[in-house]
Amino acid sequence: QVQLHESGPGLVKPSETLSLTCTVSGVSITSYYWSWIRQPPGKGLESIGYISYNGDTNSNPSLKSRVTISLDASKNQFSLRLNSVTAADTALYYCARTARVPEYWGQGVLVTVSS
Amino acid sequence: DVVMTQSPLSLPVTLGQAASISCRSSQTLVYSDRKIYLNWFQQRPGQSPRRLIYTVSNRDSGVPDRFSGSGSGTDFTLKISRVEAEDVGVYYCMQGTHWPWTFGQGTKVEIK
């Protein structure tokens, strides 16, 4: 049974870098695509980006070049880095196993951007 | 970006009655492989989204058969044949054909 668990700091200062890790269990990370999606409090869902099993990535143009997604097969983890954050980046961040589209999602981690 | 427009945004329903949610896309969702990557997600209060339907009408494993999806072109529908208490939550349509994937605004289903 696939399980995903997001981890990382719950509070990030404006202009700094948000870093999150998704730990995957129950399946090899080299077998699927993996994605990040976020949900601002009380709002809808926004795609952030995805990474393939061989490391190819794509990110939402709305986030311009602030996004980096990477994969560590030895730890069965993948990660998100979002730099130069502002209050608009405050959201619940989800990681998801992806087969063309997100299938199984983690429980999410709330990240607040505030000084 | 492809805009996904859902209606209604709020849907009070009586237990045991049917419910229907509409989703319209601003562009066709037919991918190069001729599939339509239109999905429906359920988000119960305090939980992460759960995919119910993929490629318009295919139910995910474990999804009750009272949930069904249909549609073509740019118009899609999620139907719940007999609403149960556990169906309360927000339902999102999502297109996976064009990057970035985009979601509808969500439809909040509640019991009258």
Image: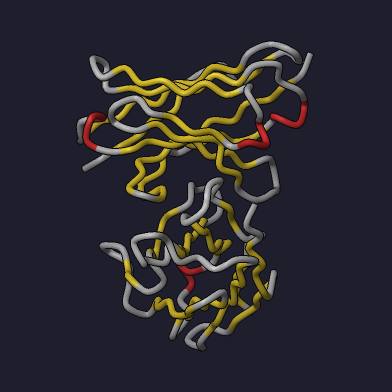
Q: In this view, does B65 lie above or below A42?
A: below
Horizontal side of residue B86 vs A103, given as left or right: right
Residue visible at 40% across and 78% down in the picture: B68
Residue visible at 47% across and 55% down in the picture: B96
Q: Is residue A5 above or below residue A82?
A: below
Horizontal side of residue B18 vs B4, given as left or right: left
Q: In this view, does B103 lie above or below A48?
A: below
Residue A81 percent location from the top left of the image: 54, 19
**Residue A46 occupies which quadrant of the picture?**
top right
Residue visible at 66% across and 28% down in the picture: A64
User: In front here: A15 or A42?
Assistant: A15
Q: Which colour scheme is used?
A: secondary structure
Quadrant position of the C terminus of chain B in the picture: bottom right
Residue B4 percent location from the top left of the image: 63, 63
User: In front here: A17 or B84?
Assistant: A17
**Residue A5 occupies which quadrant of the picture?**
top left
Residue A34 percent location from the top left of the image: 37, 36
Q: Residue furthest front?
A: B32
Horizontal side of residue B46 vs A40, given as left or right: left
**Residue A35 occupies which quadrant of the picture?**
top left
Residue B38 percent location from the top left of the image: 46, 64
Residue visible at 33% across and 38% down in the picture: A33
Horizontal side of residue B9 vs B19, given as left or right: right
